[in-house]
Amino acid sequence: MCNGTVVYKTFDADGFGYYIIMKDNETGMGFLYGHLKEESPLNVGDSVTIGQYVGHEGTSGSSTGIHLHLEMQDISSHDWVFGADLSQYENPADFMGIPNTQGISAIYNGTPQPPEPEQKNKNSTKWLKFRSRKIILRL
């Protein structure tokens, strides 16, 4: 979701499991992707670009099902703050321009657009995952 740099990567068995944090070079926005299936092939200091493979959604750490945990914070003037007040987080749906409404499906690849029929998930649970270099968000 950004053109930036990997600033943090670790494994936390009691939290996000395998996770990675990237920082956008232009805005300073931080993106945390948690509960990845396995360790990301990226390392701290690596450059990332929109659409680049970061990892597979999973259920590592403290998780009850396969999903991608996505958090956003403005880290332009400080490091990521774990356990920050909710007011310190940005809403990923707002950032992507996707309505944050139950029952909405959308595919995000840099510009909001309606989902392609063959990529709809019949599952009724909330999910966010990578498929074909796109982030698919269902609320």
Image (spheres, grey):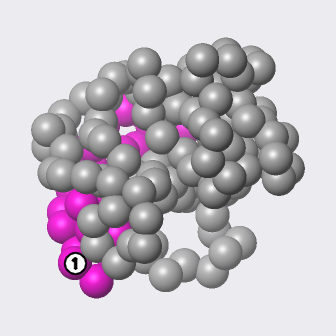
Front one among 116 and 113: 116
Mark 1 highlights which residue? 13
Camera-side residue: 58 or 33? 58
Q: Residue 87: which quarter of the image?
A: bottom right
Vertical relation: 69 (above or below) 14: above
Q: Label 1's element?
A: loop
Residue 126 point in image, percent of width and height: 63, 55
Q: Position of residue 122 (x, y in %)?
A: 64, 40
129 in relation to 116, above or below: below
The residue sitting at the front extreme is: 122
Within 10 Å of disc 1 (Cα), the crowding (few <14, some 14-19, many 20+) is few
Q: Position of residue 118 (x, y in %)?
A: 60, 17
Please report the bounds of the magenta region as a residue range: 4-29
Q: Amino acid at mark 1?
A: Ala
* Magenta span contains residue 101: no
User: Residue at point 39% right, 73% down?
Assistant: 63
Tell me if residue 96 can be seen.
yes
Residue 42 vertical placement versus 15 (above, below): above
Left or right of 73, for residue 4:
left
